[in-house]
Image: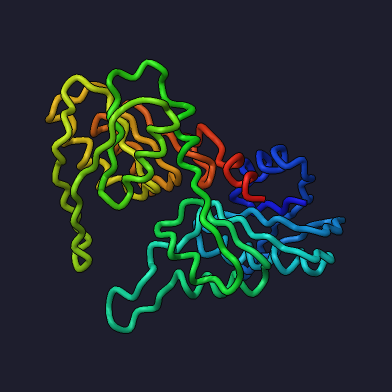
C-alpha cells in the first residue's frame, strides 16, 4: 500500500499505478499551535511504501508520522521513498560548530523504516548516513521524454563536472547529441558562484542544460548567459528536482531559457514527467 506525503500526491499516484498497489486514504491536519498530524484511515498494509518529498521541515515531521502510522496499522515492512531529500546538500560541516544536517535527518528517518530509496540525491554518499539499507535511484533518464524531437545538433551541458553523469544519462535516453560541462566555483563564505565556459561549440546548436536540482536558478542563469553570448540557438533546462525557489523561473526565462523540464519529485508547474518508473524498478 502506498502512503503519500501531502507534497508527493502526483508521484505517489503514478507509483501506485506502476506497481498495481492501492493508495491509503491519508488525511493531513494542522492544529492551531502549528503541530501536524497525519491519519491513514482504515488501512492494514502488510508492506507500506511511504512516498514523501521533504522539501520543508514540516514535510520531515509528516514523513516521520507516516512511518509511525504505518507501524501502528500493522505493517510488517515499511519502505520509505524520498523523491527529494531536503538538507541533502548539507552533507558536511562547512564551518566549525555546524551539524551534518543530512546525517541527522537520515538517522531520524532510519528509526521508522526498513529500507530507503532516494531519487538523485546531491551526493550518492548520502545513503551511507542511513542506519538501514538505502539506495539512490537515478531518474534523470525520464527527462529525455518531454524534450522536442527536432533538436538541432543537441548539446547536453552540465553546470559542473560533478553533474556530468546526469547530462550523459539524458543524452543517452534521448539517443543523440554531445555532452560537455561548465567549470563552477562556489565561495562558501559569500555564497557567490563563478561559472566559466567550457570548450564546447555552441554556435547554432540547441543546448539542454541539465542538473539534479534548480534551487534559486542563479548559477543556471549565469550558464545560460554564457551560452547566449556564444551563439546557442534554443536553450532548454532539464532537472530532476525543480525546486525553483523565489523568482527562479522568471530569472531563467529572462536569461533566455525557452522551456524548463522537471520531474515530479518536487511537484511544480514544470513537472512534465514522472520519476515513478525509475522507482518502481527498485521496488
Depth check: give the residue in front, 260 or 1.
1
Locate residue 240, reporting x and y percent. Answer: 45, 43
Residue 34 % position (x, y): 60, 67
Name the residue at 51% across, 46% down. 266
Q: Residue furthest bottom?
A: 97
Residue 86 lies, with reference to residue 269, above or below; the image says: below
Query: What residue occupies the far top of the structure in this picture?
Result: 150
Task: Answer left or right for 68 relative to 207.
Answer: right
The chosen color scheme is: rainbow
| Pick the front one: 234 or 203 | 203
Location of residue 36 (image quadrant): bottom right
Q: Nearer the viewer, residue 275 or 26?
A: 275
- Please indicate whether residue 89 sits to the left or right of residue 95 in the image: right
Q: Percent x, y for residue 216?
A: 33, 49
Residue pictured at 67% horizontal, 50% vertical:
283
At a point 49% along the width and 71% down the height, the residue shown is: 129
For residue 279, side relative to residue 65 (left or right): left
Give percent across and percent down for residue 49: 70, 55
Looking at the rendered structure, the number of numbered marks drawn on it comes to 0
Q: Residue at x 43, y 33 (%)?
A: 261
170 versus 149 height, above or below = below
Residue 45, quarter of picture = bottom right
Looking at the image, residue 248 sits to the left or right of residue 129; the answer is left
Amino acid at each position: 500500500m502506498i502512503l503519500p506525503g501531502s507534497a508527493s500526491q502526483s508521484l505517489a499516484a503514478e507509483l501506485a499505478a506502476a506497481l498495481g498497489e492501492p493508495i491509503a486514504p491519508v488525511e493531513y491536519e494542522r492544529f492551531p499551535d502549528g503541530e501536524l498530524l497525519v491519519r491513514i484511515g482504515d488501512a492494514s498494509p502488510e508492506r507500506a511504501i511511504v512516498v514523501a518529498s521533504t522539501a520543508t521541515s514540516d514535510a520531515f515531521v509528516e514523513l516521520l508520522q507516516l512511518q509511525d502510522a504505518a507501524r501502528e496499522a500493522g505493517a510488517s515492512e515499511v519502505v520509505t521513498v524520498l523523491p527529494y531529500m531536503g538538507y541533502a546538500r548539507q552533507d558536511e560541516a562547512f564551518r566549525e560548530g555546524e551539524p551534518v544536517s543530512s546525517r541527522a535527518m537520515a538517522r531520524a528517518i532510519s528509526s521508522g523504516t526498513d529500507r530507503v530509496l532516494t531519487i538523485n540525491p546531491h551526493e550518492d554518499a548520502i545513503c551511507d548516513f542511513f542506519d538501514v539499507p538505502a539506495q539512490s535511484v537515478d531518474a534523470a533518464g525520464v527527462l529525455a521524454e518531454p524534450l522536442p524531437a527536432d533538436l538541432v545538433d543537441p548539446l547536453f551541458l552540465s553546470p559542473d563536472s560533478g553533474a556530468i553523469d546526469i547530462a550523459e544519462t539524458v543524452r543517452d535516453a534521448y539517443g543523440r547529441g554531445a555532452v560537455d560541462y561548465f567549470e563552477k566555483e562556489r565561495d562558501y563564505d559569500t555564497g557567490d558562484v563563478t561559472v566559466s565556459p567550457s570548450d564546447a561549440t555552441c554556435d547554432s546548436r540547441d543546448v539542454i542544460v541539465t542538473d539534479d536540482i534548480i534551487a534559486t536558478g542563479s548559477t543556471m542563469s549565469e550558464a545560460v548567459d554564457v551560452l547566449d553570448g556564444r551563439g546557442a540557438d534554443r536553450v532548454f533546462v532539464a532537472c530532476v528536482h525543480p525546486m525553483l525557489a523565489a523568482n527562479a523561473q522568471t530569472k531563467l526565462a529572462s536569461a533566455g531559457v525557452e522551456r524548463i523540464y522537471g520531474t515530479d519529485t518536487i511537484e511544480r508547474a514544470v513537472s512534465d514527467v514522472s520519476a515513478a518508473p525509475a522507482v518502481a524498478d527498485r521496488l
